[in-house]
Amino acid sequence: MNVTHTDAPITEIDVDAVVVGLHCDGRLSPSATAVDEAAGGLMTRLFERNEITGKAGEVTPLLAVGGVRAAQVVVVGLGAAGDFDNGVAFRAAAAAARRLAAKERQQVAFYVDDDWSARQSESGICGAMVGCVGQDLYRAEKNRHPIGEILWAGADDATTTSGRIIGESVNLTRRWVNEPPEKMYPESFAERVVELAGTCQFDEVVVWDEKRLEEERCGALLAVGRGSVRPSRLVMIRHMGGAQDDPLLALVGKGVTFDSGGLSIKPSDGMKTMKLDMSGAATVLGAMHAISRLKIPINVIGLMGLVENLLSGDSYKLGDVLTARNGKTIEVLNTDAEGRLVLADVLCVAVDQGADKIIDLATLTGACVVALGEDVAGLMTNDQDWCDVVSSAAADCGERAWQLPMFAEYSQQIKSPVADIKNIGEGRWGGAITAAKFLEEFVDGKPWTHIDIAGPAFAEKDKPHCDGGGTGAFVRTLVEVARGWDG
């Protein structure tokens, strides 16, 4: 998709559709006022009759509007003015674009609000790009048709460029999550990253194969992948935008490209969407894709641990004791608690690579979804100041996250009588937190925040602003952390 800015008056631009915004108090922006006046007060009358409410995300197409050259005017609700933020801007533009993308459109111009800041416009542009792309990768008859050209009023070139780059990066993450597991497995994931490197200007891409993983003592990660004929991989992407001695940020992602549960096998319904279990790795990739193309002047490394968790005569077993990269021994009591085993070794690699601060992302626990629902990620940390930075970045983007406690008592639940630790806690309770306490054992005291994205990474059904499937959640948050990074 091409994205450019436009200075043309809204009534004179000749495009397939123009999009205007409306708050629920009925306030019209100057562009919306121009449409209303050209159409003889049509929008005002529709609002007064409650045909248009301005509710956030509500989309109302108006066809053949008099006095406007565009084929249609789309009114999108912006909600209450006091609640408006970057997240509302993203979702409103995405909802309008998703409605318009039901058929092919060559040009759509967004005049959503003349008063939006550059960051709000950037969020809107990103949302528009996300809204018109679906999960219909292998359908002959597509559900969504990406808009040929998005014209954005009131934005400069820098804003349209950054909005487009971030939108492409979110859609990259969504695409990789939506790929079927026969297409997206550890080797193919790694190969695609290498292919992508040429267009992203990554400073370095390194892939560890099974032999290298063995040499690097990644015993926990290798155990998880042992049941699959697809060999495991670890991928490192390096972006060195700062000075050589500047602090290093590490982004770590869980990349279980398919999770059967192993010997602790999932039921069929629980396995249907388990291609999503590599969402953490795909999110790190999307963020690195944006950070490198935006040329953000920091040093950051993205690390992705890639495995398939399947069954065979060589599958790792309940009762096995694994040795992680840092020497800690782990008693396995559930092979479906595999993501934390993968991340254990990758977090150790991040520490050994010299990371000063770490963020990891994973579709780690159903317990987090039970606690927070499908739209909110869980934050857990060993360093409150660092977690506050991540939480603030998420809030700035309008991505929902909530911090869960990490009291010392939770660590007692992962003590093992036969090894240093075990890979599950005591019973059902506090499972998201005991999983995080497990990960904490592998960060060597470095400031670290864990984001459990099990809920928001994948939508089971369509939403007004996004088709079902991979959502690309938290790519924008990681980009925001990178922009504000000061070590």
Image (cartoon, rainbow, N blue to C red):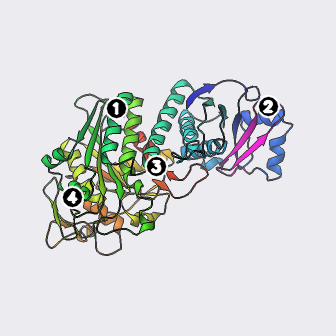
Q: Mark 3 or mark 1, which has the lower sequence index? A: 3
Q: Quadrant of the C terminus?
A: top left
Pointer 1 residue? 197
| CA distance separating discs 3 and 4 | 26 Å
Q: Mark 1 or mark 2, which has the lower sequence index? A: 2
Question: As displayed, is residue 372 above or below residue 470?
Answer: below
Percent of width and height locating residue 416:
18, 71
Of residues 313 and 38, the one drawn nearer to the viewer in this rendering: 313
Question: As displayed, is residue 41 above or below residue 467?
Answer: above
Mark sitting on residue 178: 3
Q: Mark 2 or mark 4, which has the lower sequence index? A: 2
Q: Nearer the viewer, mark 2 or mark 3?
A: 3
Mark 3 lies on a secondary structure that is helix
* Residue 389 seen in render: no
Does the magenta-highlighted stretch encompass residue 70? yes
Mark sitting on residue 68: 2
Contact between labelled residues 4 and 1, with CB atoms less than 8 Å apart: no
| CA distance separating discs 1 and 2 | 45 Å
Q: Nearer the viewer, mark 3 or mark 1?
A: 3
Q: Which residues are magenta?
A: 52-78
Of residues 161 and 444, the one drawn nearer to the viewer in this rendering: 161
User: Label 2 is placed on what type of residue?
Assistant: Val
User: Label 1 is placed on what type of residue?
Assistant: Ala
User: Label 3 is placed on what type of residue?
Assistant: Asn
Pointer 4 residue? 223
Mark 2 lies on a secondary structure that is loop
Percent of width and height locating residue 433:
33, 64
Of residues 325 and 45, the one drawn nearer to the viewer in this rendering: 325
| CA distance separating discs 2 and 3 | 39 Å
Q: Mark 2 or mark 3, which has the lower sequence index? A: 2
